[in-house]
Image: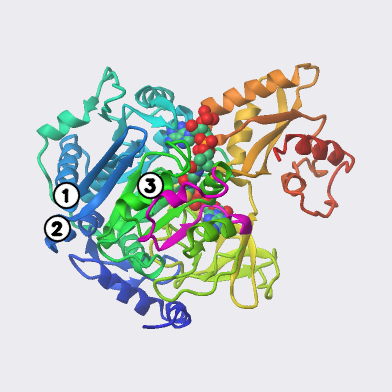
Amino acid sequence: MKTYEEQFKNSIEHPEQFWEEAAKGIDWFKPCDQVLTPAPQYRWFTGGKMNTCYNAVDRHVKNGRGNQNAIIYDSPVTNTVTHITYNELLEKVSRFAGVLKALGVEKGDTVIIYMPMIPEAAVAMLACSRIGAIHSVVFGGFAPHELAIRIDHALPKVIITASGAIEGKKTLSYKPMVDKAISLSDHEPDNCIVFQREFIKAELDQEGDIDWDQAMADAEAVDCVELEATDPLYILYTSGTTGMPKGVLRDHGGHAVALHWTMKNIYNIDEGDVFWAASDVGWVVGHSYIVYAPLLKGATTIIYEGKPIGTPDAGAFWRVISQHGVKCLFTAPTAFRAIKKEDPKGEFYTKYDMSGFECLYLAGERTDPDTYHWATNLLNVPVIDHWWQTETAWAIVANCRGIEQLPIKPGSPTKSVPGYDVRILDHEGKEVGANVEGNIVVKLPLPPGTLVTLWKNKERFNQSYMSTFPGYYETSDGGFIDEDGYVFVMGRMDDVINVAGHRLSTGAMEEVIANHPDIAECAVIGTEEKLKGQVPVGLYVLKAGVERDEEEIRLELVKMMREQIGPIACFKEAKMVKRLPKTRSGKILRGTMRSIAGGKAFNMPSTIDDPTILDEIKDALLAMTPN
Ligand code: COA
Ligand code: AMP
């Protein structure tokens, strides 16, 4: 068994050999002609033919795993636990693929999925992949306006949704939100397939509405199509610095190879093990580790429709782990902070048999040392922080337990995962020494499974990731590497914030505020918050001559934000200021305000037009900082 250092070195010095070996983990209809197409394309497994759905479902049935659980659906909010074997999953997916085919969905067509955490969401994703359609899952916490933006960009032939969801204690109706989104968008999908849930029925009253169950009853099962490894699998929109999200594009072959490889090497998961990512299918963690990776590996995945607390209590995670024999849990630190707040002594934990539980993985935001120590003391298993992004689909930096567990340094997600040549560059693009903070970048080529491009926007792909530091992928995170090679990720360098593990754009929120009729200009800044890590707060300047009550405007802005971005924006605070700090050329100094909000030292920008403004900004930000 090779050590971590040996594997890492091999992956960087001989990437083709390394990933050719990893590619043996999946089934190919035809092997590739070239493992890595050189710069500037950098495509993996060109000429190879395969199908992701075949690898995630069919082959396990062929290999005798048909009676093993593929999915365990655990929904405390509807009081349901359902087991779905690989045999049953194959039946559902191939039939639903038949439903899509019958509606005229072909290879290369796009399909939007807007669903709660139910197995049908995974079935819909796999069915698209089975016929070569490109899915784009949109998180259910986004408002119709955000869904409409994605409809107009992805131009889906079909939208798949459910009648509704239970979010904590609230019942949400999804279908009217989809109808509203379609009415707001220019593009009109041909059909909307609706999975009716027992507790809420949707009116199927729009042209092209279809009932999921009825369509399934009439459908014929269809087989997997043979796809190029480089064919697109999905688009996942993620927040950038503007209101227009970035459509990260993933391919079939590289993604399947990399994700399959990570299950053993990062998470130490074997076929038949139970793996649980407590996230949502609308985020990349859900794509990679609720749906694709565990199924590619032939493991059992949990689809959990609940929260860490309140469904019904702070013992929910321990109940699921003990009831289903979960070996590894993957969640966001914020979930642990929520549990700690409700049950600081971990009394719920002692009620459950946790003997089969081996490891906790955290990602989505930095694991602060307090949360790390609390979780480690409570669980008595390794607590592994790992760092990645929607763009990469899998961890850039982690403690690869399946290869060799390295000593943990709290506050660091450990070392670069094989495949990622992580470096720290200063603003001029020069590499800095140990312990010096700078831009975290990855030397090209990126490993398989990472973003191929941005959907219909190659220019933005180049400009966002590839042009600031030629030859490197720009992560937009800042941090440093210590003398032992441990990477410390300190936070975003741009206008993206992380709220309860959810990636959001302050730029998109500024666009909402800017639409307020009385507001001349504004800035949205992420401030630190104990439970959610960060929350957005707004500063705005009224139009000349306008006089308004600050509290009234705050309430109007909160309403606008909920309606246009969605409740997950967690936007609750806004304050009026006389002016925003700007450079002499008129550019708003957001970086300076971010530093003030984070309580960080900053150098007074030499270009600032009036330094005295910062006192008012500081007071306003302080008044809005929740703790
Ligand atoms: N559909 C509709 N609304 C949603 C939603 C969904 N899928 N998910 C969240 N919301 C709503 C919530 O109901 C809440 O609305 P409210 O303002 O009307 O109360 C709002 O969005 C904020 O939600 P959230 O940030 O989840 O806050 P919370 O107070 O309900 O729960 C935590 C706090 C910490 C328990 C919760 O954020 C959590 O479990 N986080 C884990 C994060 C995670 O899994 N991240 C994925 C990356 S790994
Ligand atoms: P997303 O694309 O939603 O997965 O969000 C990616 C961003 O979340 C990264 O660019 C980081 O800023 C942050 N992030 C994710 N995981 C970690 C981690 N383990 N440590 C620090 N930041 C993280």
Compared with 70, 551 (above or below) is: above
Task: Quickly name the residue at label 2.
Answer: 61
Q: Residue at x 21, y 47 (%)?
A: 84
Quadrant location of the C terminus in the rendered image:
top right
Q: Residue at x 60, y 46 (%)?
A: 497
Whole-percent x and y of residue 57? 20, 55
Whole-percent x and y of residue 592? 77, 48
Q: What amino acid is at disc 1?
A: Leu
Q: Are marks 1 and 2 in contact (CB under 8 Å)?
A: yes
The Cα–Cα distance between marks 1 and 2, rounded to whole angstroms, is 8 Å
- Please name the predominant secondary structure of the magenta segment in the image: loop
Residue 566 appears in the picture as rendered: no
Q: What amino acid is at disc 2?
A: Val
Mark 2, secondary structure of its residue: helix
Q: Residue at x 22, y 61 (%)?
A: 50
Compared with 264, 184 (above or below) is: above
Mark 1, secondary structure of its residue: helix
The Cα–Cα distance between marks 2 and 3, rounded to whole angstroms, is 30 Å
Quadrant location of the N terminus in the rendered image:
bottom left
Q: Quadrant of ligand 2?
A: bottom right
Residue closest to the eye, 83 or 148: 83
Q: What amino acid is at disc 3?
A: Arg
Q: Earlier in the sequence, mark 2 or mark 3?
A: 2
Q: Is residue 367 magenta?
A: yes
Mark 3, secondary structure of its residue: helix
The Cα–Cα distance between marks 1 and 3, rounded to whole angstroms, is 28 Å
Span shown in magenta? 343-371
